[in-house]
Amino acid sequence: MRPVTLVTGGTGFLGAHLVAELVAAGHRVRVLGRGGAAELAELGVEVVVGDVVKDPDGAPPLERALDGVDRIFHLAGFVSRDVDDSQRMMRVHVDGTRRLFDAAAKAGVRRVVLASTSGTIAVSKDPEPLDEKAPYPLELVGGWAYYLSKIYQEKLAFQLAAKHRLELVVVNPSLLLGPGDGRGSSTGDVKKFLLRELPIVPPGGVNFVDARDAATATEAAMDRGRPGERYLLGGPNWTFAEFFGRLERSSKVKAPRLKIPDSLARGATTVLSTLWKALDKPAPVDRVSVEMSQVYWYCDSQKAERELGFVARDPGETLADTIRDLRTRML
């Protein structure tokens, strides 16, 4: 009987595509997650209801989830730009990873693929694309809790892998687009574009990758990735002006034209955020999003292309499928 492959975060955007690929390839798959049991059961996937983070009423059922497992795809995560969610992201990404890796070592797990983000490597004030040799951009992302927590997660994962003699491979996808983002954690800005909620053109640049292509590369990383290595998974490097222009052509929704200085954008955002918070309403734009849009998220994926066989599909197809999927959900 084939050993079991455990996927944490198997009901998320990337996780759902990965689980479908693993099942199609004939793997025995088990998912540790909080929900989605009905959909996964249709695929013949075993579900252990739980979390990598300790719940208030006791420890998560990691022992049961890891029974018979020899490899893990660790995708569980929490995405937010709200500074109030900082501690929760640290608990999920850092404490959850420590728990999982310690339990995996006791269970005799051999190999782990961790899904991180390109934002732990490829983010800069300079538009030159970065590769895996770039240092952690701690100073730049220090005020962005999600990326800071993912940097700490990566560092801890490599330390624990060395301690427990686990074969660890990390994949770093850029912004995930495409169909299937049921939670809206990754395609939210495209949705705002379609709803005409983005009034200005940011000065920075973005890289995105189709979640289906990222899932294929993540699966390949388990068999072909070199232990101790990271692999950037990205598509085109576009300025936000070009990105909005492509969205306009694909969606027929008019893109914003207004451009304002960085300093003015920051100041206006601070005032608006304070005002909306006083009214106990979610702000239409937040400080973190404004700051993130002023830098370049450009990355170079040649290493993943060479070693994992990673191929990014035509970006026009990804944008069209993202728009179609979002419109279906909004309707």
Image (cartoon, rainbow, N blue to C red):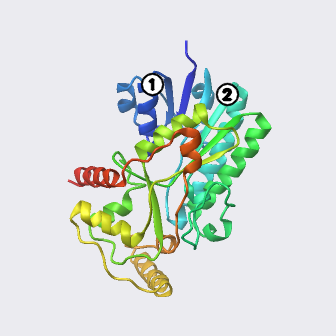
Residue 287 vertical placement versus 38 (above, below):
below
Which amino acid, mark 1? Ala
Name the residue rendered at 77%, 35% in the picture: 164
Quick check: marks 2 and 1 in contact, CB under 8 Å?
no
How many angstroms separate mark 2 from mark 1 (CA)?
21 Å
Q: Label 1's element? A: loop
Residue 55 visible in the picture: no
Within 10 Å of the Cα at label 1, are there few (<14), some (14-19), or many (20+) other Cα atoms? few
Q: Quadrant of residue 2?
A: top right
Quarter of the image for residue 246 reads: bottom left
Which residue is found at the position 56% from the left and 45% from the top? 304
Taking the image as drawn, is residue 15 in sight? yes
* Of pointers 2 and 1, the one earlier in the residue sequence: 1
Instruction: Tell me what residue is drawn at x 61 percent, y 67 percent.
Output: 141
Q: Which residue is mark 2?
A: 109
- Amino acid under label 2? Val
Q: Residue beneath label 1, please?
A: 25
Q: Residue furthest top?
A: 1
Which residue occupies the foreground of this view, 285 or 227?
227
Q: Callout 2: 10 Å neighbours few (<14), some, many (20+)?
A: many
Residue 75 rendering spot, x and y as whole percentages: 54, 42
Q: Position of residue 97 (x, y in %)?
A: 65, 44
Tell us which disc is closer to us: 2 or 1: 1
Q: Quadrant of residue 20?
A: top left
Residue in the picture at 45% in, 21% down: 26
**Is residue 288 placed above or below 270 in the rendered structure?**
above
Please tell me whether mark 2 sits on a helix, a strand or a loop. Answer: loop
Indicate the position of residue 171 as horizontal and vertical percent values: 58, 46
Q: State the residue in front, 246 or 155.
A: 246
